[in-house]
Image (spheres, grey):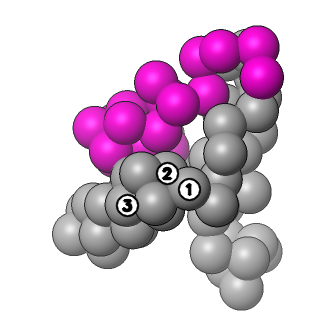
């Protein structure tokens, strides 16, 4: 389960910067934003969360906002 969460977080990273290697600090900040936004909680169950639901979309927007602040 954790692997799928981290895989999704990695996928959520800006694709245009794929040639940029992330530092350990950047990875930790990204994971912290993921957790603070509530996305880790959404992915804890066996079933995939409803990524189109309003609640999930709000969490995703919050995650993206937190990531932008961390940059």
Does the rendering let one see residue 68?
yes
Total numbered labels placed on residues in the image: 3
Q: Residues within 10 Å of mark 3 (few under 14, many from 20)?
A: some
Earlier residue among tags 3 and 1: 1
Q: Which residue is mark 2?
A: 56
Residue 43 position (above or below residue 56): above
Instruction: Determine the residue positioned at 46% across, 24% down.
Output: 41
Instruction: Determine the residue positioned at 56% across, 56% down.
Output: 53
Residue 3 position (above or below residue 67): above
Which residue appears farthest toward the left when viewing the image? Answer: 69
Where is residue 69? Give x, y as percent. 22, 69
Q: Which residue is mark 1?
A: 53
Q: Which residue is mark 3?
A: 58
Residue 9 position (above or below residue 39): below
- In this view, the residue in front, 60 or 11, is 60
Disc 2 element = helix
Magenta stretch bounds: 27-47
Asked if the residue under mark 2 is in contact with the one under mark 3, i.e. CB atoms within 8 Å, the reply is: yes
Does the rendering let one see residue 25?
no
Indicate left or right for 51 with 63 as reference.
right
Disc 1 element = loop
Disc 3 element = helix
- In this view, the residue in front, 71 or 66, is 66
For marks 3 and 1, give the CA distance: 9 Å
Asked if the residue under mark 2 is in contact with the one under mark 1, i.e. CB atoms within 8 Å, the reply is: yes
Indicate left or right for 19 with 56 as reference.
right
């Amino acid at each position: 389960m954790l692997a799928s969460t981290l895989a999704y977080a990695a996928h959520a990273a800006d694709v245009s910067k794929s040639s940029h290697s992330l530092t350990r600090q950047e990875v930790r900040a990204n994971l912290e934003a993921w957790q603070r936004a509530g996305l880790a909680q959404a992915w804890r169950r066996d079933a995939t969360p409803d990524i189109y639901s309003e609640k999930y979309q709000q969490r995703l927007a919050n995650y993206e906002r937190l990531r932008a602040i961390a940059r």
